[in-house]
Image (cartoon, rainbow, N blue to C red):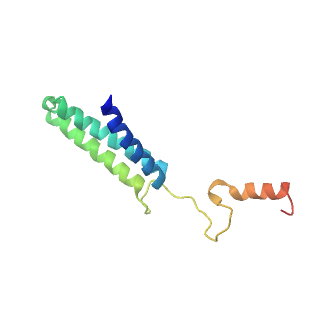
Amino acid sequence: MNEIACFSLPAMYFVNLALFMFETRSTIPVLMATIIFFAVLGGGLVFNEFDYESGHMTFVGIVGTVITVAGCVMLVRDDEYSLIKEPPHRTDGGAADLRFGADEELQDLQDLAPGV
């Protein structure tokens, strides 16, 4: 039981830190890919699962790992090849934000309370 607390608490800390620092849509896929990768690697090493793999199975595993890492890299990148595109937002310092339709909400509030 102590092992669970020993590993769970730091993991929760770093997950929360990553979610605070980065966007959820890139943090969660990278986190899940990392957990799955190390679970497969740990299971293969601890239970000697790699001893029973043929050359074809090893090749397919390596190709799958490369595809997963490439997908995570494409999610996290900030250039024109990124899979995640940032929506346009205002840069003029206005209170309204175009990302979530805040301009329409602001107009609705101004219609409800004119002069405020």
| Left or right position of 2 against 48 | right
**Residue lying farthest right?**
114
**Is residue 22 in view?**
no
**Residue at image point 19% right, 40% down:** 59
Does the rendering let one see residue 100?
yes
Relative to 100, does residue 95 appear above or below in the rendering? below
Image side of residue 33 versus residue 97, left or right: left
Residue 86 placement, left or right of 11 = right
Instruction: Please state the horizontal and vertical placement of residue 27, each as a whole percent of the image.
Output: 43, 48
**80 or 28: nearer the eye?**
28
Taking the view exactly as shown, the residue that stands out farthest to the bottom is 92
- Identified at 41% across, 45% down, the residue is 13
Residue found at x 36% / y 43%: 10
Quarter that holds the C terminus: bottom right
Viewed as shown, does residue 37 lie left or right of 16? left
Q: Where is residue 88 in the image (x, y as percent from the top left)?
A: 58, 62
In the picture, residue 68 is in which quadrant? top left
Q: Position of residue 52 (x, y in %)?
A: 14, 28
Asked if 104 appears above or below 94 in the picture, the reply is above
Image location (x, y in percent) of residue 48: 15, 30
The quadrant the N terminus occupies is top left
Q: Which of 12 and 89 is in front in this view?
A: 12
- Residue found 69% across the figure and 56% down from its top: 102
Front in this rendered view, residue 103 or 113: 113
- Quadrant of the rendered structure where residue 2 is? top left
Q: Is residue 1 above or below residue 15?
A: above
Tally of numbered discs:
0
